[in-house]
Every structure is written in structure tokens, then in C-alpha cells.
Image (cartoon, rainbow, N blue to C red):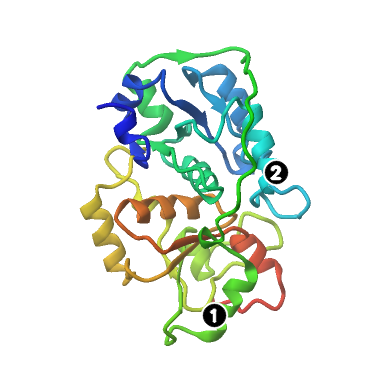
Amino acid sequence: MSSSKTASSPFVSTMWLADNINSVIPVDGSWHMPASNRDPYQEYLERRIKNARSFGIDEIKDKTVDLPHMLPSPENFAKAVGDLGISENDHIVAYDSVGIFSSPRVYWTFKAFGHEKISVLDGGLPKWIEEKREIESGPVSITPKEYRTPTLNHKLVRSYQDIIKNIEQGPDTSNFEQVIDARPEKRFTGVDPEPRPGLSNGHMPYSINIPFHAVIDPSTKNTLLDNDSLKKLFESKKVDLKKPIVLSCGSGITASTLYFALEKVGARQIAVYDGSWTEYASNAKSPIVK
């Protein structure tokens, strides 16, 4: 299978990446919850796919707001990605150290800035290592490239104001957007507390709960479910794939996992609420259901 034929394929296998490793740029987009005490960059230096670059989700972000990792400005994105030796013409393959966890956030970020040649590695680093494929370690030397300043595709992003407007108009209107929340069920229902101190649990009115791990194949724990299983999951939650869908979670990471799974099964009107529950629940005026 040639690289050119699948340059825009959103989902690639470890075998495909191994066959095309010299014509694409692997990007390690690993990220972990703060309480995990894991340093993704240190882990990247210790063990990475050949020629991989480290995309720091907590570094390449909007640092002017008090939210975990909002999208950076187009200018800052272009500078950061160019410094990684990536141009707008390169085919990127995002992966992470869990399997399918934070790499879809990298995928969505590149897509939001108009980068079409972006894929996610099914199974991520765990599957790559399991298959005893080539691993690098040690310091990295990267020659920067010029990345043309992109334009943000607003169709893929939702703001707090968008979410409130959607709630106010209600589900009986023709342009209502289905909101899917990827947080664990007990945080969604209000039984378990949020991991971020002082943040209310519960959920947005009319939102649907599909915890992100529901789209992961339980037999492998690091690959996505097949398309038929994904479609059955969304149907069981009464999600209409033909109508607009907005994804939310705690801070915009696992929302992107659902974004990727929905795109994989043919949903086209999909966006991520970038601020997600951290922004929403931080506003005292936000309506919350428990």
C-alpha cells in the first residue's frame, strides 16, 4: 500500500506505518492526567518510534487563559509545529503511549488548523512495542521547517457561548446539536467528584454520556472497536450520525477520542467543545444536571 494512496487516511495500522516510516512523520502526542505523575516528554526520550517528534499538549496551547489546554493561536501553532521539523505538506501519524487516548487530540488539533494529511496509529506505542518494531531513545536533533500560518476551521470547534446557545434553544429545534460527554459515567451523573478541585460534577442539560473507553476494544485495550460495533454503540445511545454532534469531556482530550471514532464511522458534522467541562462548570451561571 503506497503512502500517496492513503495520505489522508485517518487510521493507519502499525504494519502500514512500518512500511511507510520514511515518508511520514510520527508524532508522539502522549498526555496523562496530572495525578498520574508521568512525564510524557521524559518517556518520549526513553522510548519512541523512529524519527518521532514530541507534541506537548500542555505546551502547544493557549497560555493566555486559565484552562488546561485550549487551542493555541494559528501563529503559535505554526511556530511550534515548524520547530518540530514539520511543514503543512508533511503526512503526520499521531500516536500515544496508552494506545488510543490522547493521540486523537493531536489529530483534531491538526485538523482544526486545516492539516489534512494527519492520521492516528491504531494501537499506538503499546502495539508497536508488542510487535517488536523499531524503537529509538536518547536526545533528539531536529531541523526546524517553515510551517505556513494556518486558518482555524471554526466548524470543528465550539465555544462556551455556542454550548449555552444550544442548551437555551433546546433539542426540539431544527439546528440543535447533540452533545456527547466522554467523562466517566459517575462524574456525569454526579456520583463521583471531578478530579479538578472545586469543580462541580454533573452534566449539561440534554447531553449524552458515552465514556471514552466505551469506544476502545476491550480485548486489546489499545485499539478502537470495529466500525459495526462503534455504530451499534452510538445507536444504543440514540446518537444520530447524520445530525450535528459536539464532543465534550473534562478538558478536551478524550472528547477528541470520540470525535475520531465518530469520524471513522462516517459522521461529518462533528466538533469539539474545546473548554469542555472544566470551562463549563467553572462558570457559576452554567446550568448543571445531577
Question: Quick check: 92 left or right of 240?
Answer: right
* Amino acid type, residue under disc 2 in the picture: Glu
* Amino acid type, residue under disc 1 in the picture: Ile
Count the marks: 2
Q: Of 46 and 139, which appears nearest the observer?
A: 139
Residue at image mark 2: 75
Q: CA distance from mark 1 to mark 2?
A: 32 Å
Q: Does the residue at mark 1 contact the one at mark 2 (Cβ under 8 Å)?
A: no
Secondary structure beneath dot 1 equals helix
Residue at image mark 1: 167
Identified at 27% across, 67% down, the residue is: 235
Labels 1 and 2: the sequence-earlier one: 2
The quarter holding residue 117 reads: top left
Q: Of 10 and 29, which appears nearest the observer?
A: 10
Instruction: Residue 16 in the image: state x and y as whole percent.
Output: 30, 27
The quarter holding residue 76 reads: top right
The C terminus sits in image quarter: bottom right
